[in-house]
Image (cartoon, rainbow, N blue to C red):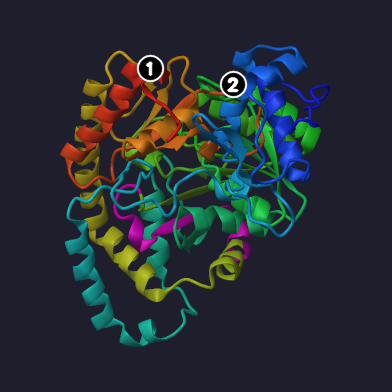
Amino acid sequence: MTNWLPDLTGGAGPLYQRLADSVEAGIDQGVIGAGTKLPPQRDLAYDIGTTVGTVGRAYQLLRERGLVSGEVGRGTYVLGRRAEGVKPEAPDVSVEGTRYVDAPQDKLRFDSTAAPDVGQGTDVADVLSRTARDHPHEISSYTRDFPGRWYEAGARWLSRNAFRPAADSIVPTLGTHAAVMAAIAALTTPGDYVAFEHLTYSQISRSAGLIGRRTALVASDDQGLDPADFERVCAQKHPRMIFLMPTAQNPTLTTLSAARREAIAHVAREYNVILIEDDLYGHLTDDPTPLLAEYAPERTIVAGGLSKSVAAGIRGGWLSCPPAYRHRIRIAHKMITGGMPFLLAEVNTRLVLSGQASDIRKRSIAEISARIAIVRETLAGFAFKSHDKVPFVWLTLPDPWLSGTFKNACLEHGVLIDDEDEFKAGRSEQVFHGVRFGTSQPRQRGDVANGVAVIRRLLDEGRAGYDSFS
């Protein structure tokens, strides 16, 4: 590395970030090869005229990106470079995110917000058995026609506050994610912009990118999406659609006020933007604020499902849309997913229409509330947002913790959480210094208590208590 110096004349942001970006660019371009030893921090600091601390922060950022490894007494080495046809050592966050998909089984999974296990397996098993007995022919074949009860179940499940969708507005789907993607695929074309908040359920933006849609980022504050910035983005980039979670937004738990919802609806109508309202967590909260769909029914698609309140494994979802969109979205859903399986659709319908889904939802909320109470007691004194009925927490990290570093520290102590990059819809210069962790997946409340105790201990000890070198 003696002949290489970073180019820090371009780019934006603090010096340590530009230094890390320059090293990353060198790796991407093949200038810095795999296995190369980076210059000692003190030497590089002298060469570029900065402090050792600045170089140290840059090297730590490179470690968090999965580009280098640090070895005590030996230095910092490049793990690999991003070349065409070569899979990077670290995942492509824009497509894969930062979540541990194939995580070791001995870790506590605080990176999921699926409905807790409250014994719903018994309910589902009974409905499965009766469905198989009643409809053997439909199960053995492809689903060509949807019975009216499937639409009625969706209308009933998506109803909240004064919002009461008609059955002829419903599309049954394989979960909320599939519902949203079907709407994006049906109502936009490759090259169109879809708008997102900087932090959101980013798997939608990644999925949209895979089918050729571009991302436009809209700013938010502590009250949620900023209508003025939404108008700016509409005027500059003309997005065809915007994805929002107005109630109990994931991951920040922000709920938009009625005034903001009305303002967003006004901007969307002025610029002819379709609104996708993901009410998956809103359905847990019983928040009385009118749905966005009540302010702009002619352009709002409401999506929801059973994954957070009943059971994620049965892939129950529906969307409600203006009738003119329904046929296109249903066809797009079939093209994307391969079609709606009769067994799952019928099971989900029976759960909803029988009232069993609502009963399981009540049991899930009670369990979620008990677990959130554990979090509030254990993390008292630290800055975090939580809701009695929502199975995740947004934790603001105290200085000097970085989101990725804290996530790695939790991993080394046996707890899987999500850093803020997991929720970034696109390349954003905003830094939030937050992490999200869920409480619903550990089997027992004692496991929740143990995991939150680990988080509390790391917060108390600070960075001084965590060494990223093995």
Which residue sits at x=47%, y=26%? 434
Is 39 part of what is drawn in magenta? no
Seen in the image, is 359 located left or right of residue 382?
left
**Vertical side of 347 occupied by 366: above or below:** above
Residue 226 in view of the camera: no
For mark 2, does the 10 Å Cα neighbourhood hold few (<14), some (14 to 19), or many (20 or more) residues? some
Q: Nearer the viewer, residue 428 or 164?
A: 428
Query: In front: mark 2 or mark 1?
Result: 2
Residue 83 in view of the camera: yes
Q: Nearer the viewer, residue 38 or 120?
A: 38
Residue beneath disc 2: 56
Q: Between disc 2 and disc 1, whose residue precedes?
A: 2
Which region shows up in magenta? Answer: 308-328
Q: Three-letter amino acid code at disc 2?
A: Gly
Residue beneath disc 1: 383
Residue at the far right in the pictured view: 9
Q: Three-letter amino acid code at disc 1?
A: Ala
Seen in the image, is 219 located left or right of residue 64?
right
**Vertical side of 202 occupied by 382: above or below:** above
> What quarter of the picture does the C terminus occupy?
top left
Which mark, by number, is residue 365? none
Which residue sits at x=57%, y=46%? 90
**Vertical side of 418 occupied by 149: above or below:** below
Q: Position of residue 431 (x, y in %)?
A: 58, 24
